[in-house]
Image (cartoon, grey):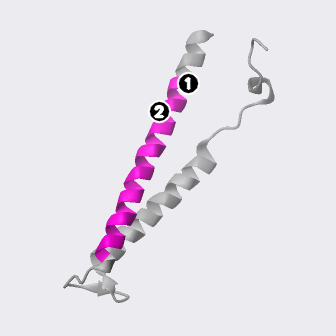
Amino acid sequence: MAGLQESRRTENLQKIANRIAAGVIVAALILASAMLMRGDVAGPTLFDYPALAMVMFLLASALGFGIVLSVLLSDRRPKVREERSPRA
């Protein structure tokens, strides 16, 4: 029984670590696109903003929504009997 609990704990920690890493990547994309939007970049534009900055921002937005959907759809809720610890 302890091995199963350790396996589940490790799985949950990996899930948390992956979400934190994805969140950092999304934040970096948003910051980079914001920095590019402020500068006068010569080249193609989309809605009067540099195209590269708009593409990066749209990609970051899509990834952010994907993370939120993943959390909402894939996380399982603990059953009533799993909410209490076995020693309580």
SS category of the residue bearing label 1 = helix
Checking the image for residue 24, the label placed there is none
Q: Which residues are magenta?
A: 9-36
* Residue 20, percent from left and from top: 46, 44
Depth check: give the residue in front, 54 or 75. Answer: 54
Residue type at tag 2: Gln
Q: Name the residue at 51% across, 53% down.
A: 67
Q: Indicate the quadrant containing the N terminus: top left, top right, bottom left or bottom right.
A: top right
State the residue position of label 2. 14
Q: Name the residue at 54% across, 31% down.
A: 12
Dot 1 alpha-carbon crowd within 10 angstroms: few under 14, some 14 to 19, many 20 or more: few
User: Mainly helix, strand or loop, the magenta region?
Assistant: helix
Residue farthest to the bottom, as pictured: 48
Q: Quadrant of residue 36?
A: bottom left
Asked if residue 33 lies in the magenta stretch, the reply is yes
* Residue 31, percent from left and from top: 36, 65
SS category of the residue bearing label 2 = helix
Q: Name the residue at 19% across, 85% down.
A: 42
Measure the C-alpha gap from mark 2 to mark 1: 9 Å
C-beta proximity under 8 Å, tags 2 and 1? no
Q: 84 left or right of 49?
A: right
State the residue position of label 1. 9
* Residue 58, percent from left and from top: 41, 70
Q: Name the residue at 34% across, 89% down.
A: 48
- Counting residues from the start of the chain, the first of labels 2 and 1 encountered is 1
Depth check: give the residue in front, 79 or 56. Answer: 56
Q: 68 left or right of 50?
A: right
